[in-house]
């Protein structure tokens, strides 16, 4: 990968997009993960106002604040807001009697957190005529749909969604993103038991990238390991395809109109 060219291309693309959209700036939700850290850095390089928004819902995490501090030292166009919604989320759970509900609601609760964050991001975006920037990568967004519909999938633009996780690692190193962020274990932070992305998905990002490469090459023969990985990938892709494709529309035949 031509790292400098990719970085410059994304920044150029962002500048063109915001210019055409007549917006004033960008808002990026930061989690302390590598994807949101790289995205926020690339966005800040446009020199447009860039709001970094941290929204803890379960517990505090030092990495978003460390990244914000790192960014504020480097960019005069960057601002940072932290809105702790832990009490708000506890009230939400109490209102719906979630913890006493015998129905398995873990996934619904995780998705609710993501959608609450989306609401806050758009609140600040609307206040300032900013664009909400997505932080999903190619494997998550277009490979297996590992995001929440109308949660972290509810954004205005996706600058890194054509990059694999390994590509983002390379760019993060080039941008000198904090070492502890670059080497942190990927997690979406939506679960009390702090489960990792690998534990949720059942495959590592390296495995998923391998599956996508095999799919693109359309190989006829797989090793036993490759076959297992590709089957799991296909299952996840098909299961979450409704997130990846445009919303289906019932088109009425012209003769009926």
Image (tube, grey):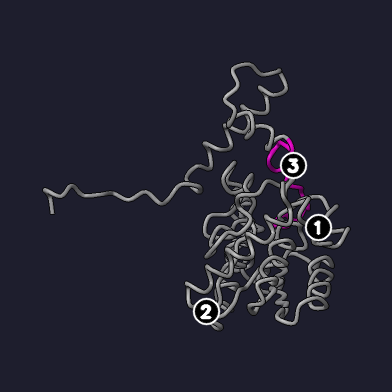
Secondary structure state at the residue bearing disc 3: helix
* Spatial separation of the CA atoms under disc 2 and disc 3: 36 Å
Which of labels 1 and 2 is toward the front? Answer: 1
> Of label 2 and label 3, which has the lower sequence position?
2
Res 177 visible: yes
Vertical side of 117 occupied by 165: above or below: above
Say which residue label 2 marks: 126
Contact check, label 3 and label 1, Cβ < 8 Å = no
- Residue closer to the observer: 143 or 177: 177
| Neighbour tally class for label 3: few under 14, some 14-19, many 20 plus, Cα within 10 Å | few
* Spatial separation of the CA atoms under disc 3 and disc 1: 28 Å
Residue drawn at x 59%, y 49% is 141
Contact check, label 1 and label 2, Cβ < 8 Å = no
- Residue closer to the observer: 89 or 114: 114
184 relative to 168 in the view: left or right: right
User: Residue 42: horizontal and vertical position, in percent?
Assistant: 69, 65
Say which residue label 3 marks: 199
Q: Classify the position of the C terminus by image quarter.
A: bottom left
User: Residue 246: horizontal and vertical position, in percent?
Assistant: 42, 50
- Residue closer to the observer: 179 or 44: 44
Say which residue label 1 marks: 174
């Amino acid at each position: 990968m031509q790292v400098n060219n990719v970085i410059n291309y994304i920044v150029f693309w962002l500048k063109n997009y915001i210019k055409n959209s007549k917006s004033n700036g960008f808002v990026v939700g930061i989690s302390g993960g590598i994807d949101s850290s790289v995205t926020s850095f690339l966005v800040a390089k446009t020199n447009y106002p860039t709001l970094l928004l941290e929204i803890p819902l379960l517990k505090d995490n030092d990495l978003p604040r460390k990244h914000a501090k790192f960014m504020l030292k480097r960019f005069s166009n960057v601002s940072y807001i932290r809105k702790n919604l832990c009490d708000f989320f506890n009230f939400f759970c109490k209102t719906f009697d979630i913890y006493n509900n015998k129905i398995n609601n873990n996934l619904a609760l995780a998705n609710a957190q993501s959608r609450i964050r989306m609401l806050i991001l758009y609140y600040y975006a609307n206040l300032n005529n900013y664009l909400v920037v997505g932080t999903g990568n190619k494997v998550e967004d277009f490979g297996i749909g590992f995001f929440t519909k109308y949660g972290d999938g509810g954004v205005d633009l996706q600058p890194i969604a054509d990059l694999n996780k390994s590509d983002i690692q390379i760019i993060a190193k080039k941008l000198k993103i904090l070492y502890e962020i670059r080497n942190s274990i990927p997690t979406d932070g939506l679960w009390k038991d702090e489960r990792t992305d690998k534990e949720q998905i059942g495959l590592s990002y390296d495995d998923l990238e391998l599956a996508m490469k095999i799919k693109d090459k359309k190989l006829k023969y797989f090793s036993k390991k490759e076959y297992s990985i590709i089957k799991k990938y296909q299952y996840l892709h098909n299961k979450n395809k409704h997130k990846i494709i445009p919303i289906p529309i019932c088109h009425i035949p012209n003769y009926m109109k």
